[in-house]
Structure formats: structure tokens, C-alpha cells
Image: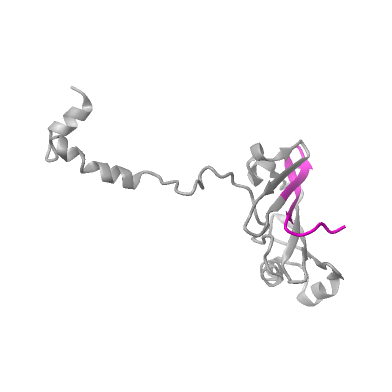
Amino acid sequence: MSPLRLVCRTGPFSGPVRLFLFLPLLLLTAPADVDGAARRPRVRDSILGIRIGSTLAEARSRLDPVSFRKAAEAEQDERERDEGRTIAWSLKQTEYRSIALKVNDAQRVVWITGYVRPGNEIPFSALGDLSIARATDSIAIWNLASAEGGYRLVARGRGRRASVISLLSLAVRPIL
């Protein structure tokens, strides 16, 4: 006798009609993949929580508490150009030793670069799915679409381990 028939013929839920009572339960507990999120490759889209399009205020609120410098010193070190401002932080207590970013005239991040502490290099595979990247032993590049117009993740280092990680907006013209 098959196990299915044994279950259907014994106990308080006996008979073929009772088997259909379990079908909704099985469907409710099955994993749903409505929008295909499980099939979408995962690629890092932020550095210390700062993404392309984040505001300068958001970046400062995340980086100032873990920075060596005081806010007044940081204001003096900002370099301003016609295209926006470039700002850098030296950090403590993070996997990055320093962070540099550029904001546009609307005070939105258009690129951010993190310099990983020596000895804590990050494997390229931890940053994203290498099957969708252009990768060598020293660099990996992902180009990704987003609601803000897309971004590029670039990881540089030796032995497929990143010591420098950059996020660049693909929605703005390149700054030369």
C-alpha cells in the first residue's frame, strides 16, 4: 500500500475528500516568488549605508560619528567645483579606513569610493554575483539598473579581493 493511501485511509482525516483540507495549507507555506526577487542577482548598492542619490546630510549623519575629524575641519577640507563638491572622511571602527564622495548641485551623491583597511579586503564574490560582472583577478565591474538611472559598482584589488570599492551614478554625465 502506498504511503499516500495509508494517510488517506487512517485517522480522523480519512478518505480522499479529507486530503484536500491539507492542500491550502501546503500552498500557504510554499515560498512565493511573485516579482522574481529570488532570481535577481544581489549586488551591493551602498557603502556604509550611503547609496547613489543619498543626500549629503544623510552621508554626514552616517560618517561624522565614525570619523576622526570634527565637523569644522571637514567643512574646510571640502573641495568645490562647478559640478559639485568632493568630501572625504578618515574613519575609525569600520571596515573602511576612508571614504570619499562627490555630491552634485542638488546635494545628492553621484559617486562614492571606500578604501578598505589593509588586511580586511573584501572578496569580489561578497560584493555581488560574479556571473553578471566583468571580472579579472584585479578588478570587477557591475553595471546595474535602478530607479535613479542605474549605477556601476567597481571593485579593485589583488587576488579577487577588493581594497577599493566605488559606486558611480550612470544617470549623470562623466566628470573629467
In the rendered image, the residue lying farthest to the top is: 1
Give the percent coordinates (x, y) of residue 115. Answer: 77, 54
**Residue drawn at the location 45% of the way across and 46% of the way down:** 33
On screen, residue 74 versus residue 18, left or right, reads right
Give the percent coordinates (x, y) of residue 6. Answer: 17, 29
Examine the image and state in which quarter residue 49 appears.
bottom right
- Residue 138 among magenta residues: no
Which residues are the magenta region? 153-176
In the rendered image, the residue lying farthest to the bottom is: 72
Secondary structure, magenta segment, majority class: strand
Give the percent coordinates (x, y) of residue 167. Answer: 72, 54
Applied colour scheme:
one colour
In the image, residue 16 above or below residue 101: above
Give the percent coordinates (x, y) of residue 97. Answer: 76, 57
In the image, residue 70 above or below residue 7: below
**Residue drawn at the location 63% of the way across and 55% of the way down:** 146
